[in-house]
Image: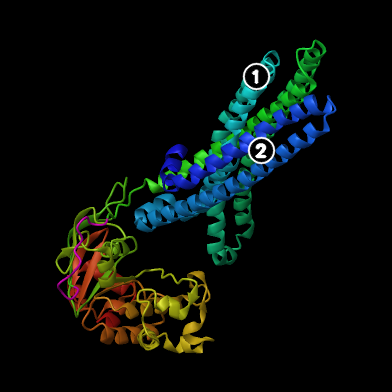
Amino acid sequence: MLIRLLRTCLRPYKKPIALLVVLQLLQTSATLYLPTLNAHIIDNGVVEGDTGYILTFGALMIGISLVQVVCNIGAVYFGARTASALGRDLRAAVFDRVQSFSSRELGHFGAPSLITRTTNDVQQVQMLVLMTFTLMVSAPIMCVGGIVLALGLDVPLSAVLIAVVPVLGVCVMLIVRRLRPLFRSMQTRLDTVNRVLREQITGNRVIRAFVRDEYEQGRFGKANGDLTEMQLATGRMLALMFPMVMTVVNVSSIAVVWFGAHRIDSGGMQIGDLTAFLAYLMQIVMSVMMATFMFMMVPRAEVCAERIHEVLDTESSVVPPAAPVTELRGRGHLEIRNAGFRYPGAEEPVLRSIDLVARAGETTAVIGSTGSGKSTLLGLVPRLFDATEGEVLVDGVDVREADPALLARTVSLVPQKPYLFAGTVGSNLRYGKPDATDDELWAALETAQAKEFVERLEGGLEAPISQGGTNVSGGQRQRLAIARTLVQRPEIYLFDDSFSALDYATDAALRAALGRETADATVVIVAQRVATIRDADRIIVLDEGRVVGSGRHHELMAGNQTYREIVLSQLTEAEAA
C-alpha cells in the first residue's frame, strides 16, 4: 500500500527525483573514491617519503570532497522540496476527499481519526520520503560500491564482508517484522487519545455541570496510558536494533584488523590497503545502519499509508452527476416522492414512503416526536445524504441530477446545531455570498432579530467570532446562522429546529419578519415547539419515519391523534384552539 501511494503521488516529480538520484550517485562515488586516494598517499607518499605525491593527491582529495559537499547539498535540497510537496499533495487529497463525504462517511471515520490521518499520518509518510531521498538512495550505492572496491583491494579479507552483511540483514528484518503490528496499534491508540481529548474540550461545560472531572481525567489517563504503553513497547523493540548492529560492526572491525595484520605480515597486503579496507568496511556498515534507520520508519509509514488510502479509496455515497443539470426552471418547488432512507446495516429504515410537497410562497412545517426522522428528511434535500428509495425533486429535477453548486444556491439549510467559523460576524454572514454589502448584512441581521446585539458588540460586523461561535450564546448563534442564510437569498429555506434556543417573544418577532422576507420563497420548518409552526400553510406529522398526517393546525387538531398529543403536551386545550 505504501509503494502504491508513493508511486501515484510522486509521479509528477520525476525530474527532480531523477536529478536527486544523479547527485546522490556523484556524491556517493566521491565518498567511495576518497579511501583509495588515501591508500595511495600512504603507500606511495608517506612510506616512500614523496612530499610532492602527497600534495598532488591531497589537492585531488580536497577537490573531490568539494564535489561531494556540493552534490550532497543539492540532493538534500531537492529531496526536502519533493518530500514537502508530497506532504502538501497528500493533505490536499485527503481534505478534498473528506469534503466530498456525506454525513454517512464522516460518521464512519469520525472527526478525530480524520484529523490524525490528515496531519500525523501524512507527516510520517512525508518523513519517510525525506529520509529515503537523503539517506536511502545513497545507502545501496555505498554498500555495493564499498564491497566491489574492498574486493579489489584484497579478496581473501573480503570474506569478512560476506559474513557480516547477511547477518546484519537478518537482524534488521527480524525486528522490522515485529514492529509493524506495534505501529498499527500505536496509531489506533493515538486516534483514541484525540477522540477523548476532543470530547472533553467540546463537552467541558457538561463535565463541570455534572462534576465529572475525576471520571474524565480517568478516561483520558487510561487512553494516554495505553498509548504510552504501546510507545514503550515499540521503543524497547527499536532499542534492540542499534546495539545489535553495533555489536556486529565492532566484531567485524576486530576481525578485519586481525586478519589484515596477518596479510601485511605475510606481504600479501600493504598498510594503505588495510586502511582503505577499514574505511570501506565502515562505509558499508554505515550504509547498512542508514538502511536500518529507514527500516525502523517503514512499518509505521506503511500503516499510515494504509490509513490514508482508506480515506482516499472511500467513495462518497453522494456522487456528483455525470451530466449535471445547470439550470432550474421554477421558483423553488420542492417535492418528495415515496422517499425512504436506511443507514447501512440498520435493521429498520429511518424514513419510509415519505410524500411531501412544498410550494413557493408557502410555509411547510414538519413536526414529530424525537427520533421520528425530521432532521434526516431535511438532509435529503441539500444532499447531505441521498435517499435510498424514491425521489427528491426541486423544480421537477431530481437533486441527484442537479449541479451541486446550483443546488447549494437554490437550497439553504440552517441546521439544528448551527456552526460559526473563526473570524468575524461579517465573514460568517458572507460565507454563502462573499460579495454581499454591509447594507445586505445589516438587513439580514434585522430580519433575524440579531441587529441589536451585533451593534452592541465591539466592532459591529468586525466583531470577532471564535471557532464554533462559542463566544456568543446559543440563541445568538442561531440568529446569526439564520441571517447567514438570508444573505444568500436561496429559493428554498430549510430550518431544522433553528428557533429552539430563542425565547417566545424573539421567536414570534423573527417568524413575523421572516414571513415578510421569504414571502416568495419556499420555506420548510422542522420544530418541536408547536407555537413555531401552528400558523404554517401545511403541517406534516411524522411518526417513526412515516407521514401520519398532513394539513393545517385546526384540521390536524380535529382529526390526527398524534398531532393532538404533541400539541396538548405543550399547550392547554384553550391555547391550542
- From the top left corner, tell me how far across and down residue 146 is, in percent: 64, 27
- Crowding near pointer 1: few (<14 within 10 Å), some, many (20+)? some
**Total number of numbered discs in the rendering:** 2
Above or below, comparing residue 298 to residue 328 in the picture: above
Tag 1 near tag 2, CB within 8 Å = no
Residue receiving disc 1: 151
Establish if 167 lies above or below 29.
above
Query: In the rendered image of this protein, does residue 65 appear above or below residue 528?
Result: above
Is most of the magenta stretch helix, strand or loop?
A: loop
| Residue range of the region highlighted in magenta in the rendering | 320-332
User: What residue lies at 73% left-to-right and 21% top-to-bottom?
Assistant: 252
Kind of residue at badge 1: Leu
Q: Horizontally, is 423 left or right of 404 in the view? A: right
Q: Position of residue 25 (x, y in %)?
A: 57, 37
Q: Amino acid at mark 2?
A: Gly
Q: Residue furthest right?
A: 49
What kind of colouring is applied to the model shown?
Answer: rainbow
Residue 323 among magenta residues: yes
Asked whether 373 or 544 is in front, the reply is 373
Residue 241 appearing in the image: no
Task: Report which residue position mark 2 lands on.
Answer: 235
Please say whether residue 224 is visible from this viewpoint. Answer: yes
Q: Quadrant of the N terminus?
A: top left
Quadrant of residue 213 within the rendered picture: bottom right
State left or right for residue 101 relative to residue 276. left
Choose the circle earlier in sequence order: 1 or 2: 1
Secondary structure at numbered mark 2 = helix
What residue is at 31 percent from the left and 78 percent from the top?
Answer: 532
Dot 2: few (<14), some (14–19), or many (≥20) neighbours within 10 Å? few
Q: Is residue 120 magenta?
A: no
Q: Position of residue 7 (x, y in %)?
A: 43, 41
Residue 285 position, x and y percent, is 68, 28
